[in-house]
Amino acid sequence: MSAVPAARKTRAPHADLDVATIRREFPVLERTVHGKHLAYLDNAASSQRPRAVIDAMSGYYETTHANVHRGVHTLSQEATDSFEGAREKVRRFINARSMKEIVFVRGTTEAVNLVAQSFGRPRFGPGDEILISWLEHHANIVPWQLLCEQTGATLKVAPITLRGEVDYDAFTALLSPRTKLVALAHVSNALGTIVPVRRFIQAAKARGVPVLLDGAQAVPHLEVDVQALDCDFYAFSSHKMCGPTGIGVLYGREALLREMPPWQGGGDMILAVAFEKTLYNDLPWKFEAGTPAIAEAIGLGAAIDYLEALGMERIAAAEHELLEYATARVQEVPGVRLVGTAPEKAAVVSFTLEHVHPHDLGTILDHEGVAIRTGHHCAMPVMDFFNVPATARASFAFYNTRAEVDQLVAALHTAREMLG
Ligand code: 7TS
């Protein structure tokens, strides 16, 4: 789960992944943009999908679609089997103890909101504290602010260092008997920092504080084992891990999920409804009101099969190599300043280019076929910390190549000549 071992860093390019073959499995990577090869380097925002995922979803629509959990007819039963089969794949992928602990949601954002409203709202009150870090995506800030407004609880923020690491000593100093929940990014989307979460979790657990991890940027790139991490909640999105949009996962420790009330009411989350009293369904369906995203769950299952066949360790090694290459090459461009230089990083290179606004840079790069994200990356406090309005962010997946890094660097030189 942790960073790539040092020995791997010396491996041949892309470790042992056959990137040329892999790329042919991603139809969109064959297209051009403005007549140029598309270098898709915006994977932290959303990755692309392999044919296996697209086929699993269209195959489901062509042969099986029906509503789940509701019919005795064949299609409904097959759809239910495929949907619940996807849940089992997720369980195995993150090594949860039971499928009861895998709640399908729309994505990381919804998962965090679910925990805030169902775990936090009934329990927290004035004087209670929720501890996050300065690195967080807005999805791991705003739900807590809403909860604080609703309950009178207070949001505490652990500072970060100049390299973009969460300051462990400051974090532990902020843990107090008032702390009722810790919510941390596993990997920062804006900077790529891999937070050594085991240490932070141990510190919280030693004080009996439950921990939620925002794994949106971790699950696509690292091996994640929720039992080894010993976290209480873990949230992630399918669309960043080669799966479809519209679905994600909340892992929750069974004992906690059991105690939590449903957060939305409706069909599928009940056992029996009467006007006097409604009996809620068992886990995990208690948290899945209404018709779920069935094809999307099946697509997510296919994405997991795909990633597992490649191997998360090999994916991490290949991406780490790209990170090292890109970090060195981007710095060759005069005026580039890296933002976020933690020693352990996922394959994200965030930077500014002197005299060029990131937005203009993004536009010029697009004309050169290079897709990167420019802006605040939904992490405005991180931008404030580094005193920049925005950064340019190249984020890599295992299907990216060194040639695409070179294309990015050439485009940066072009931008500098035009605007610098
Ligand atoms: N948490 C982190 C760390 C993220 O990177 C994102 C999305 C989210 C939560 C929210 O995920 P969602 O699927 O619910 O939207 N990050 C980005 C990004 O970096 N650029 O676009 C979306």
Image (cartoon, rainbow, N blue to C red):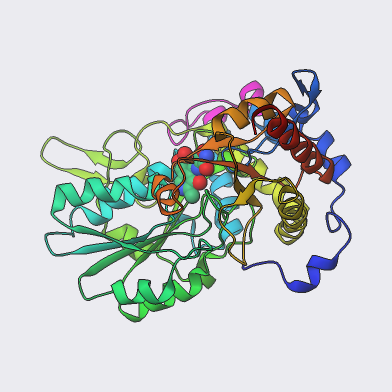
The magenta stretch is 58-76
Q: Is residue 256 above or below residue 150?
A: below
**Residue in front for this viewpoint, 32 or 229:** 32
Which residue sits at x=76%, y=52%? 322
**Residue in front for this viewpoint, 282 or 86:** 86
Q: Answer with left or right where residue 138 lies relative to residue 316.
A: left
Which residue sits at x=55%, y=33%? 357
**Residue in front for this viewpoint, 181 or 173:** 173
Q: Is residue 170 above or below residue 160?
A: below
Residue 157 in view, yes or no:
yes
Please tell me how many numbered marks the rendered image carries.
0
Residue 82 in view, yes or no:
no
**Residue in front for this viewpoint, 198 or 78:** 198
Q: Is residue 362 above or below residue 174?
A: above
Q: Quadrant of residue 95?
A: bottom right
Q: Position of residue 278 (x, y in %)?
A: 19, 42
Q: Quadrant of residue 132?
A: bottom left
Q: Residue at the top extreme? A: 34
Quadrant occupied by the C terminus: top right
Q: Is residue 73 magenta?
A: yes
Quadrant occupied by the N terminus: bottom right
Q: Is residue 102 magenta?
A: no
Q: Residue at the bottom extreme? A: 206
Q: Answer with left or right where residue 84 lies relative to residue 202.
A: right
Q: Position of residue 367 (x, y in %)?
A: 71, 23
Q: Is residue 76 above or below residue 388?
A: above
Q: Position of residue 201 (x, y in %)?
A: 43, 72
